[in-house]
Amino acid sequence: MIVRVMTQSGNIRSALSVLVLVVLGPAVAWAQQPPIAAGGNGFKVGDGRLHPFFDMELRLDTAVGYFPNNATPDPEDVVETLSPELVLRLRPGLKLDVPSPKVALSASGRLEYVRYTGLLTGQSTYASHFEGAADFTAHFNRDGPVSFVLADQFLRTDQTRNAALGAGVLSLFNELRASIPIKPGGGAIEIVPEVAWGLEFFQPIGLATPVGCEDGVCDPITVDAFDYTNVRAGVEARWRFLPKTAVVLDTDLDLRSYLRATTTSPDALLLRAMAGLAGLVTAKIAVTAKAGWGYNFGASGGSTFIAQLEGTYLYSPTMTFKGGYLRTLNPVASYGLFRDDRGYAEARALFGGKLVLHGYASVDFVGFYDALRPRSDTLLSLDVGPEYQFKPWLVGAAGYLLSTRSSSVTGTGLNFTRHEGYVRLTLVY
């Protein structure tokens, strides 16, 4: 068993991410958390308001990372499975909204300190780290026939969006986007060209190689080989030919390249295009149906049919149900491309103006495009829980999350079940 210390570059990257989050504090948003209630009056900023808030969360997580065995003095004796831990998360942040027909600004976010308490896994405390996010949007000439949107998203999290990698990985992601919404003829036709530039860096949470790992994608120690940059250009178009129904067209081109000279990940030049209909079937049922094709012009090749079918049912003004099927094709480290067939269902209800209940479930069947290393994964996700507004400035929440993953590739990093239960209090002014 091999135990290694994080590289110096990983520590530098951690420090830089903290610095960026501090500097961009007013523009930080935590994408994986529910919206914060407005609460209080905040501070007046021009025509808008700035709301400071603070989250305190205690979470029981059964799969935080790989760590040495507490029962032995040998640092190379690593527990074969992901270790459990009681995790304290502290999240100070700010939320800013400045509505304006000339320049509308929207920004929110937080810096998050993740403290592994060591109560369940004594060796986990050294892996405590900072997370957080930054999300900023500026919309110029919002009500005009031609407007301009500039946005940036910065995210540091242990929930990586890279489908090839296993558990125990921290992701540092940033994407800058610019779009020009065009609405000629009163808005019946809308065309939105967009360009985006993204970067993502990876580093391990624990300091150990998981047991049974026979492929680099399941080893968090070597994940920096998958750091990448991605340039995306696309156009979304919508023609509302009936009052409540529109023809939609989505097309984009991804140019994915990897930053490490030693990486074996093939670059990708992926074109995706879908067309279909979106609108109301009845006063309470909305449907989106799109179909198309994805094709990789890169050296590794690969193409497939892609589609989306989604229905939303407004049971009442305070209760909504949503479900659907999504088939996508995306670039990914190591394999070049992956196809994802996802089925999902979601429900959300508001009771008494203060209690919100939410539930979400999904199953993904993921296939990777590599003839020499065939691989398929199955992922199951569940997220349920209540949120209650005790006061305009105090919100409480609790929840349970389940994540399971099984892969045709061996290794505990790609085959695991993760249970998370949490309680959270949010103070907002």
Image (cartoon, rainbow, N blue to C red):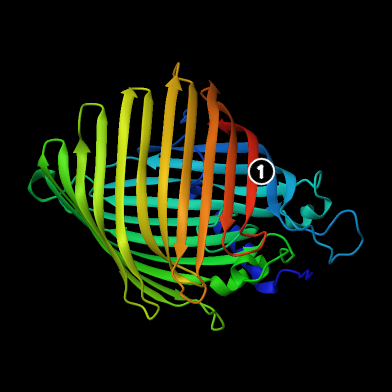
Instruction: Residue at the far right: name it.
Output: 73
Tag 1: residue type?
Arg
Foreground residue among 275 and 37: 275
* Residue 318 x %, y %: 37, 22
Residue at the (69%, 51%) spot, across then down:
64
Q: In this view, does 398 lie above or below 107?
A: above
Q: Is mark 1 on a helix, strand or loop?
A: strand
Quarter of the image with the N terminus in it: bottom right
Answer yes or no: is residue 163 visible: no
Quarter residue 240 falls in = top left
* Residue 125 x %, y %: 78, 53
Instruction: Residue at the far left: name it.
Output: 185
Instruction: Residue at the far bottom: name it.
Output: 261
For this view, does 192 lie left or right of residue 351? left
Foreground residue among 104 and 122: 122
Instruction: Residue at the far top: name it.
Output: 352
Q: In this view, does 101 lie above or below 390?
A: below
Quarter residue 288 falls in = top left
Q: Mark 1 points at which residue?
A: 89
For this view, does 131 lie left or right of residue 95? right
* Residue 252 x %, y %: 28, 63
For this view, does 269 lie left or right of residue 146? right
* Residue 364 x %, y %: 46, 51
